[in-house]
Structures are given as structure tokens and as C-alpha cells.
Image: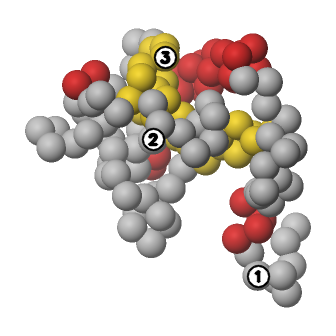
Amino acid sequence: MLNCPYCNIFDDNSHEVIMSNERCIYTLLKEQEIKGAGIIVPKEHRETVFDLTQDEWNETYKLLQEVKLYLDRNYKPDGYNVGWNCGHVGGQHVFHSHLHIIPRYADEPMAGKGIRYLFKSNQKVD
């Protein structure tokens, strides 16, 4: 897609491509709020995770395992948040599917506040 930043990620100076496989790319933002935070992006334009092919799912999984080894070796995080934002209401801002991999560290202000932190405190979460 012509104006999609993730379809043209190799031309984007704000991203550093770290590794890839046949169907996916793992990239880091050069300026990061959380060290090591990056995304896995399918090479073909897919609007959301629900549009991925089975091969893209499989290659995303394989690359995710390699990314974890890379992050563990280079950044030594204490935990991770991993997830997709789908659709405008779901928080998606770039409409090319991308999996967020966010290393978390014990000394950061939001340590221990994962995805459940978004839920109201009076909601029951199983």
C-alpha cells in the first residue's frame, strides 16, 4: 500500500529492522520510551490480526520466539507485554497489522501494571 508506513518500513528512518523471516519483519523504533520495545509486522499489507493467513500466523510465532531470545540477551527484561490493537476503538493507529512486543523492567513506574490495569477495579477478571 502506497502510504502505509509499515508497507514501506525499510524506507522509514525512525525504525531499525532487527530481523525478519519469509513473511514478517521485527523492528525497533530508534527513539524508544521503553528500551527494546518493538513490533512484528507482516510483509504483506493486512489491516488487522484477523486478516493474517495461517502462514503469516505461523511465521509471526516463529519470529516472536527469536525476538524473545534477542531481547533476553540484549536487554534482560523482567517481563513482557505482548499484544495487538485492532480497529480504531481498539487503539489501532496504523492500519497495518502489527504485534507489539514490550519488554518490562522492575524499576519502571508502570511495573506490575499489565493489560489488566486498563480494567476498572470493580470489574471481576478471571
Q: Is residue 15 above or below residue 82?
A: above
> What residue do we see at 72% from left, 60% from top?
115
Amino acid type at circle 3 is Ile
The reply to whether discs 2 and 1 touch (Cβ–Cβ < 8 Å) is no
Q: Which residue is mark 1?
A: 120
Q: Nearer the viewer, residue 67 or 23?
A: 67
Work out which quarter of the rendered image holds the C terminus and state it: bottom right
The reply to whether discs 2 and 3 touch (Cβ–Cβ < 8 Å) is no
Where is residue 101 shown, x and y percent of the image?
A: 61, 37
Q: Earlier in the sequence, mark 2 or mark 3?
A: 3
Q: Secondary structure at mark 2?
A: loop
Where is residue 107 shown, x and y percent of the image?
A: 84, 45
Residue 57 seen in the current view = no
Where is residue 2 shown, x and y percent of the image?
A: 11, 38
Q: Earlier in the sequence, mark 2 or mark 1?
A: 2
> What residue do we see at 57% from left, 20% from top?
63
Q: Quadrant of residue 106?
A: top right
- Circle number at residue 18: 3
- Circle number at residue 98: 2
The residues tagged by marks 1 and 3 sit, at their Cα atoms, a distance apart of: 37 Å
Q: Nearer the viewer, residue 26 or 126?
A: 26
Position of 88 with respect to 111 (left or right) is left
Amino acid type at circle 1 is Lys
